[in-house]
Amino acid sequence: MKIKEINVYVCSPGRNFVTVKVITEEGIYGLGDATLNGREMAVVSYLQEHVAPCLIGRNAHDIEDIWQYLYKGVYWRKGPVNMAAIAAIDMALWDIKGKAAGLPVYQLLGGKSRQAVTLYAHASGENVEDTLDKTEDLIKQGFKAIRLQSAVPGLNVTYGVLGDKKDYYELQGNRPLPPEEPWSTQKYFNMIEELFSKARARFGNDVHLLHDVHSRLTPIESAKLGKLLEPYNLMFLEDASIAENQDSYKIIRHHTTTPLAIGETYNTIWDCKDLIQNQLIDYLRAAATHAGGITALRRMADFASIYNVKTAPHGAPDLSPICFAAHMHLNIWAPNFGIQEFVGLGNEQSKSIFKQSIEVKQGMAYVSDAPGLGIEFDEEAAKEFPYKRSYLPVSRLEDGTVWNW
Ligand code: GCO
Ligand code: MG
């Protein structure tokens, strides 16, 4: 089954998505997501100029060989641009293989380990009470796990909080230059315990609670936070600290039994090998789009499984519905799947472009038996929403020092 053509599309139904379509001589095609938020066009050009020409005429069934060819074969390994490009091609090839076999991708991975995928939703509020009200709404909708974020009093903007924007699409829709946002660890610590103590008092112990620190703390501060939140029994604390130095998580681990999750920016297993092998984390949040696709995530999940680390794929709105579909197939298969982050199936514009076959009921997601990834991409609809340059914010401490966003 020879690859005949590879097309790359960028559309912006509220925010930018990079989509790859690999077409075979037989007419079977596959779709992949190559979205790298704030750096989209670098991946587009990498794919068009450097990847696509090498793949024309190759056998679309050779998923592993093509992965290795694009990873080992180019000499320049790793990196977010490179790995997003490999990821998109890889997803598209799994989509093709599934369509050719008449099977959903999860069947090719080994079949179902569970009937449905547990999701965690986001409650992000202007203050503690607002976050708790939103949590209550989500519990009423049937969600069993909820990530709580609240604006930090004294800071005019806080990560994850919508302000006057109606959704995450509007939040990032129009940022032709990176906005700057303040950070104060002290102000954050003044708010955070109240959020979780009030949540447990109001909702009891049955609902899973989670929290994303977004890498704002140093390891010893994360250790302190983990200890402080232990009584509130979090499912996990996400991105407590940056782990470029993977050993630094020993400091956090040494002090707290609060479970730790990390990995949404990781591009390869090498970013988290020590974290996993030394059992310094509990959940791996790597995303198919940023870590080399289904082939790479499957390998990471298997490696993690022998160290009791579960998977919890990134599910932010800057991953396209194609990535979400890829995650669903991995999630339904992976014996060590933990939980999937969920921010909805997209806004109306994105739903007009990406036709998802996943169903969400009572906080659980169900994958369909459609062959391949089970998602369609409407090229004509995509043309109505052209690319718009847009950036993630930059974070600064109150004295002006650049900090981790
Ligand atoms: C999450 C993430 C996102 C990121 C975003 C950056 O846990 O969902 O932290 O909200 O900020 O994906 O591009
Ligand atoms: Mg996160």
Image (cartoon, grey):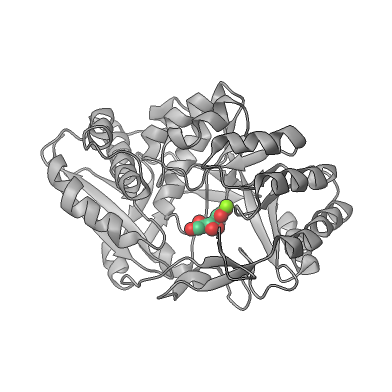
Left or right: 243 in relation to 30 = right
Q: Residue furthest right?
A: 201
Rendered-image quadrant of the N terminus: top left
In the displayed structure, would residue 272 be above or below residue 316?
above
In the displayed structure, would residue 150 be above or below residue 334?
below
- Kindly identify the residue that appears in the image at 30 percent across and 46 percent down: 82
Percent across and percent down for residue 154 are 73, 73
- In front here: 77 or 319? 77
- In front here: 201 or 102? 201
Percent across and percent down for residue 211 are 69, 51
Residue 136 picture quarter: bottom right
Can residue 378 be seen at all in this image of the molecule?
no
Rendered-image quadrant of the C terminus: bottom right
Can residue 189 be seen at all in this image of the molecule?
yes
Left or right: 394 in relation to 259 = left
Percent across and percent down for residue 370 are 39, 41
Percent across and percent down for residue 165 are 58, 76
Q: Residue furthest bottom?
A: 164
Residue 129 picture quarter: bottom right
- In front here: 399 or 95? 399
- Kindly identify the residue that appears in the image at 33 percent across and 66 percent down: 11
Left or right: 183 in relation to 19 = right
